Amino acid sequence: MTPQLVVFFVLAALAVGGALSLIFQKHPIHSALSLIVVMVSLAGLYLLMGAEFVAAVQIIVYGGAIMVLFVFVIMLLNAGVEEHTSISKFAGFPGLLLAFALTGFIAATIARSTDSVQAVAQPGNMASTRDLSTMIFRDFVYPFELTSFLILVAVLGAIVLAQREKA
Amino acid sequence: MVPTNYYLVLSAILFGLGVLAFIFKRNIITIFMSIELMLNAVNLAFVAFSQAMHKLDGQVFVLFVIVVAAAEAAVGLAIIILTARNRQSLNVERVDLLKL
């Protein structure tokens, strides 16, 4: 059991626990806080894999911006404990089966294709943030510019949707 | 080092839990959060493959996925605010008609 494996299992348990907590919490604000736990532990996993920049972006954008937006909307709408109806309880049974089948299918596919995937990465020569930025601004420069346009359109759409209509 | 398989199985588990939350939850905001959880699971698989293949493409894709998720959160939450204002409820079972 190497130290990396120990760190991996701790972070993986945190992530799965947070995801389970997201499901079992009744109040949306508790679900949001559980999701933040998942995101921070995923950032730790990215660090473990040597993807420092992605880990930083994960914390800043996901843990910071997006989750603050969620918590803000929950507080703005004064969301309470969710209510269950008989239909939602009935829908739970096939839903549970389907979700387990999906997870099992994905996991089985991964387990079967061990040859190509199981290659253990050598530590040390993982590419740096500088290589990542070179890649973004050279090979992916047009998609990068398109994403800035996408963000602009999304912000405009959000403002148009959320503003109160003038009576 | 941690084998890539472990990361992929963790990603599959997180994705399954996201699907489960998507099906089970009745609050529209929590359903939206489970979509974010599924996106995160996919990001983990992307970074794991990027590390296994010693290529940075996966990490670049993750950055693009995060950008799209941010745009999606902005527009989606605006739609949620609008829906909640019109229907006075956050329960998806009360949002089953196109017309009020």
Image (cartoon, coloured by chain):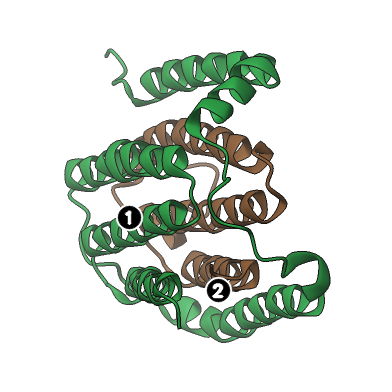
Chain colours: A green, B brown
Front-most of residues A163 and A34: A34
> Badge 1, how many Cα within 10 Å: few under 14, some, many 20+?
many
Q: Is residue A163 visible?
A: yes
Front-most of residues A130 and A88: A130
Q: Is residue B85 visible?
A: no
Tag on residue B5?
A: none
* Residue B71, position as x, y percentages in the image: 48, 30
Front-most of residues A12 and B33: A12
For label 2, the residue is B13
Residue B98 vertical position relative to residue A85 in the rendered view, above or below? above
The quarter of the displayed image where residue A24 is located: bottom left
* Residue A152, position as x, y percentages in the image: 48, 14
Residue A131 vertical position relative to residue A33 in the rendered view, above or below? above
Q: Position of B78 compared to A71: left or right?
A: right
Amino acid beneath label 2: Ile
Q: Which chain carries label 1?
A: A
Amino acid beneath label 1: Val
Q: Position of A146 compared to B95: left or right?
A: right
For label 1, the residue is A40
Asked if the residues shown at circle 2 and circle 1 are in contact, with their CB atoms under 8 angstroms apart, the answer is: no
